Image: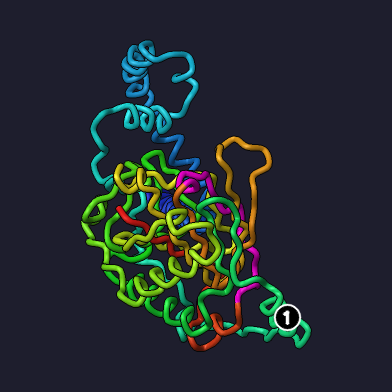
C-alpha cells in the first residue's frame, strides 16, 4: 500500500513538472515573439544608435591606434590649416600643385565658346511679340530724318555721314553678317587670360584680331578658324562713303582714300559697352599715312565718345544712329574713342520685323587697311 502511494505521488510530481516546463517554454516563446515585434516597430534612429554603440566598442581600439598617426601628421600643418575641414586642405593642395587634377576639365582659351557661334538674329521659332511704335513715334523718326544734316565735319579728319545707309542697305548688311556670323570664324565673345571678357560679341573679316595680343593673324588662336573675306558689297559701300566724305572736308588729303582688307564686326547688346581706346594695331605704314577707319552703325543708337587723351574728363560726344557712317583718319586717326552704352528700342522697325529679326542692340562694322 505504501508502495502504491509512492508510485502515485511520483506520477503526480512528474505531471506537475511537465506542465510547468510547458508553461515556461510557452512564456519564453511569447517573450521572444514580443521582442521581435518591438524590434520591428523601433525607429530607424534607435536601431542605428544600437548598431553604433555595438560598433563603437569594436572600433575604439582602432581609433586609439590611428589617433597617434593623425596627430603626427597634423603637427606639420599650420594652425589655420588644422582649423579647416579635410576637404578644404585637400583642395588647397590640388590648387597649389603644378599638375592638373585627374578628371578636371581642360582650361579654355580666353574667348572660346562651347555653345557655338553667337546669332545676332532671333531664330524664327523663338520670336516674341513686338509692339509697334506709336503714330507719334513714327512721325518723330521721319521728322528727325528730314531735319538731320547729311554730313557733319566734326574735326580735321573726322566726318559723320548721317543716314548714309538706307533701310535696304541695312537689311542686306544684317543678313550677310548673320550668315557669316553663325559659320566658321563667326561671332564669339572675346576675352583675356585673366578671365575678363569684353562686353560685346565679335567677328573678324579678312584678318583675325586678338584683344589679348593686340595683333592681327590669318586665323584665330583658340580654334584655328580662318576669318571670312570682306563681302564685295561691303567694299563698295566703304568706297562710296569715303568719296562722299570729301564733300565736307577742306581737301581730299584730310581723309585719304583706302581699300579695306580688315573689318571688325561688333554686336553690342543693350548692356554692351566699350571703353576709350585707340585703333593702333594696323601696320606702321597704314598708321603713318593716316588711312581712315570707316564705321557703320546699324540697329539701336549709341553715344560715341572721342578725345585726344584717354583720361580726359569731358570727351567730345556724338550720337550714332542706325544708318550712320563715321569716318576718322588723317589727324584724327589716333583719337581715343569708345561706346559707354546703348540706347534701347531706338532702332528702325524694319530691322526687328520678319525681314531680319535683329536682336535688340547695335551692330557695328569698322573697316580699316592693315
Q: Position of 257 compared to 125: left or right?
A: left
At 50% from the left and 41% from the top, the residue drawn is 49
Q: Residues within 10 Å of mark 1 (few under 14, many from 20)?
A: few
Identify the residue at horizontal 32%, vertical 41% (top origin).
213
Q: Nearer the viewer, residue 10 or 201?
A: 201
Check residue 49 for magenta coloring: no
Image point 73% across, 80% down: which residue? 143
Vertical comparison of 85 with 243: above or below: above
Residue reaching furthest to the right: 136
* Viewer-side residue, 210 vs 110: 210
Q: Badge 1 is on which residue?
A: 143
The residue sitting at 39% across, 35% down in the picture is 55
| Range shown magenta | 331-347
Residue 134 horizontal/vertical position (percent)? 75, 85
Dot 1: element: helix
Picture coordinates of residue 37, whole percent (x, y): 51, 59
Of residue 70 and residue 303, the one placed in the foreground of this image is 303
- Can residue 15 be seen here? The reply is no
Rendered location of residue 137, percent (x, y): 74, 81
Residue 263: x %, y % from top left = 36, 61
Q: Is residue 345 magenta?
A: yes
Q: Residue furthest front?
A: 251
Residue 15 quadrant:
bottom left
Q: Quadrant of residue 234?
A: bottom left
Relative horizontal placement of residue 76, taking residue 298 as reference (left or right): left
Amino acid at each position: 500500500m505504501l508502495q502504491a502511494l509512492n508510485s502515485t505521488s511520483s506520477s503526480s510530481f512528474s505531471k506537475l513538472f511537465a506542465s510547468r516546463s510547458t508553461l515556461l517554454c510557452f512564456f519564453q516563446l511569447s517573450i521572444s515573439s514580443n521582442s521581435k515585434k518591438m524590434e520591428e516597430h523601433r525607429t530607424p534612429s534607435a536601431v542605428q544608435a544600437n548598431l553604433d554603440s555595438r560598433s563603437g566598442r569594436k572600433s575604439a581600439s582602432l581609433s586609439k591606434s590611428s589617433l597617434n598617426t593623425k596627430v603626427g601628421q597634423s603637427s606639420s600643418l599650420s594652425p589655420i590649416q588644422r582649423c579647416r575641414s579635410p576637404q578644404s586642405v585637400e583642395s588647397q593642395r590640388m590648387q597649389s600643385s603644378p599638375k592638373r587634377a585627374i578628371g578636371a576639365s581642360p582650361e579654355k582659351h580666353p574667348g572660346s565658346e562651347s555653345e557655338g557661334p553667337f546669332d545676332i538674329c532671333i531664330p524664327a521659332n523663338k520670336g516674341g511679340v513686338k509692339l509697334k511704335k506709336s503714330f507719334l513715334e513714327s512721325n518723330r523718326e521721319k521728322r528727325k530724318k528730314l531735319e538731320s544734316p547729311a554730313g557733319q565735319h566734326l574735326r580735321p579728319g573726322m566726318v559723320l555721314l548721317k543716314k548714309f545707309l538706307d533701310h535696304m542697305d541695312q537689311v542686306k548688311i544684317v543678313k550677310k553678317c548673320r550668315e557669316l556670323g553663325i559659320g566658321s570664324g563667326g561671332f564669339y565673345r572675346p576675352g583675356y587670360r585673366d578671365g575678363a571678357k569684353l562686353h560685346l560679341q565679335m567677328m573678324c573679316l579678312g584678318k583675325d584680331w586678338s584683344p589679348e595680343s593686340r595683333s592681327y593673324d590669318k586665323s584665330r588662336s583658340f580654334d584655328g578658324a580662318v576669318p571670312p573675306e570682306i563681302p564685295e558689297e561691303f567694299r563698295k559701300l566703304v568706297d562710296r562713303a569715303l568719296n562722299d566724305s570729301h564733300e565736307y572736308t577742306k581737301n581730299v588729303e584730310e581723309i585719304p582714300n583706302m581699300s579695306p582688307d580688315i573689318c571688325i564686326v561688333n554686336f553690342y547688346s543693350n548692356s554692351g559697352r566699350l571703353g576709350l581706346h585707340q585703333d593702333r594695331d594696323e601696320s606702321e605704314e597704314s598708321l603713318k599715312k593716316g588711312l581712315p577707319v570707316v564705321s557703320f552703325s546699324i540697329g539701336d543708337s549709341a553715344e560715341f565718345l572721342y578725345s585726344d587723351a584717354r583720361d580726359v574728363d569731358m570727351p567730345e560726344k556724338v550720337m550714332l544712329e542706325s544708318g550712320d557712317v563715321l569716318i576718322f583718319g588723317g589727324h584724327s586717326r589716333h583719337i581715343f574713342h569708345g561706346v559707354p552704352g546703348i540706347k534701347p528700342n531706338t532702332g528702325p522697325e524694319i530691322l526687328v520685323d520678319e525681314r531680319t529679326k535683329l536682336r535688340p542692340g547695335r551692330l557695328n562694322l569698322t573697316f580699316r587697311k592693315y
